[in-house]
Amino acid sequence: MPYETRESIPTQYTWDLSSMYENDDAFLQALEATKAYPEQFLAFRGTIAQDPAQLLAFLQLDDAVGIELGKLVNYANRKSDEDTRDSTYQDYSAQVITLYTQIAGSQSWFSSELLTLKDEQMEAFYAQEPQLEGYRRALDRVFAHREHTLSPAEEKLLASAADMASQPENIFSLLNDADLTFADAADARGEMHPVTHGSYIPLMMSPDRTLRHNAYQNLYATYRQFRNTCAATLGAQMKQQKFYADARKYESTLEAALNGTEVPVEVYTNLIEAVRRNLPAMYKYIDVRRRLLGLDELHFWDLYVPVVEDVEMEFTYEEACDLILRALAPMGEEYLSLVKMGLESRWVDVYETPGKRSGAYSAGSYGTHPVMLLNFQGKLDDVFTLIHEMGHSIHTYLSCKNQPPVYSDYVIFVAEVASTCNEALLTRYLLDTTTDERERAYILNHFLEQFRGTIYRQCMFAEFELRVNEMVAEGRGVTADALCELYHQLNEDYYGPGIVMDDDIAVEWARIPHFYYQYYVFQYATGFAAAIALSQRILTEGENAVHDYLGFLSGGCSKTPIELLRGAGVDMATTQPIDDALAWFDELVDQMAQLA
């Protein structure tokens, strides 16, 4: 049942934030004490390259401050999300952000000063101050950027251009989120429905095909009207990326973007190569979708509507907890005990209340236990959300437990692996135990859509972004016509002959904000593929695979993300995990086809 106030929810269904701070007073005391840190960091300036003891003291202070900042950010944001209408916690969050910015500014000199040390000087530092060895990998990452770091005067000039360089993304955001409006869409009965960014996908999932078609056309009619402005903005984004890549002596914008995450360029290009090799499975899925929907022709406005009507699979929260424990049984008792601890120790904020932030997430920091925000409604999607966020939380818990602060935070490249691995295990369990054919079809549809949206679609985005960057590198014009032609061709390639290629899809690039995130989207696809491969290894190899997987979850950023995943049994420097994941997709499509 819905709860009208937070106070009316039984305590066991609310999260426990006491591992951060016992109450607001403790938070405010810590916030006040942390305000002294910027001055302490500045006091180290000019000393860290002269004295190894000073370098160690700086790094130890950085650890301590990072722990306290993590708690401050977590507490302020979690309390704010309990009721977004409460201005008290909005103010707390704003104060923490201000402090965070001040501390970052007080450390901005560190890398430049460290890079004045030559390799032999640094080795002498390690010999004189053995505790520095614990920071060797972190320091090596700074030194790895030496050849891409400019003189202090040049660095200052580049830094001063940062605000200007961020304007393409700002302009796109204002245009897309604030200025663009879309005509209302009529349904089959002639009733009108507002088309907004928030309503568009729900409209695309409507069983009313007339409504889907009209919403699709009305959305893209607006983007087509502004396609030249969108092209100029995206072109400016790509040009500023090239400016920085050239200035820092990188071979390409792709190398510049991936260098900071320690991901080889080949991982990006391997993804595109492997997905293209497995496009026939997508073509088969498109045909199965058309047949299940009973259509003569499949259009792009038919891609999101469920091929199976909503199945009434209802769960209490306790039933959902029991289900995820059964699904995660292949992970072994050590992992299950951590899941049980999270469920029993109030890691989860379960139910929706007025003002509570929508959606779901997992959050945590060093020295605290993770917490998860849900808005549990009792649907199957809510069970998937619970097991997904629990994957994030166990990853965070194990990394913080097993790594020192400097290596406790895992990078974005691996961030979705644990959560998606859990979802894959739940899918496998449901497919193995469900006897109702409609439920089985619903589960298959749910997971096949994840494959389509996360591997195929995100890979298409990644290839588009790469190709546009290449256009800029070659000095070709990034015009609306050129972008539409490229995007139309990619849709033909990725979706195949089974879908009608209308003119509107060619302008879809104009509404995708991720093209301003600098080679970000490929990580959705690689993370998903790695998770599928790991879940399959766990189910087929058992204890040894689980042991390796727990090692990965405990690794934080103590090694490169490729090395961490390789230790778990998945080599993302090859195309094998993507091929294996899409082979399973192909199998699931065949199962779905039997229902058509």
Image (cartoon, grey):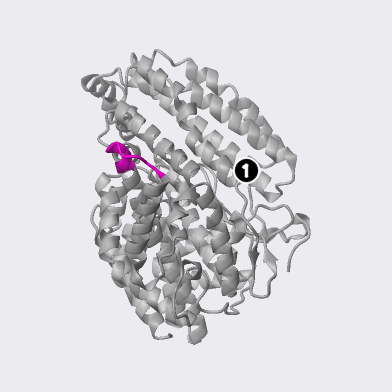
Q: Is 452 or 423 nearer to us in this picture?
A: 452
Q: Residues within 10 Å of mark 1 (few under 14, many from 20)?
A: some
Q: Quadrant of residue 235?
A: top left
Is 300 positioned to the left or the right of 24 in the image?
A: left
Position of residue 125 relative to residue 381, above or below, is above
Residue at 54% x, 23% y: name it.
Answer: 37
Q: Answer whether residue 380 is visible to the viewer in this image.
A: yes
Q: Residue at x 25, y 54 (%)?
A: 270
Task: Tell me what residue is drawn at x 28 percent, y 31 percent.
Answer: 144
Is 537 situated left or right of 192 in this image? left
- Write the residue at 64% across / 37% down: 93
Please name the residue that numbered disc 1 is placed on.
77
Q: Is residue 478 magenta?
A: yes
Q: Position of residue 412 (x, y in %)?
A: 41, 47
**Residue 580 figure quarter:** bottom left
Q: Nearer the viewer, residue 561 or 446?
A: 446
Asked whether residue 334 is in view, the answer is no
Q: Position of residue 36 (x, y in %)?
A: 58, 21
- Residue 195: image quadrant is bottom right
Up the image or down, 74 lies above or below 33; here it is: below
Residue type, mark 1 in image: Asn
Secondary element at tag 1: helix
Q: Which residues are magenta?
A: 469-479
What x and y, as percent, mark residue 472? 32, 38
What is the x, y in percent for residue 431? 44, 79
- In this rendering, the answer to whether 162 lies above or below 8 is above
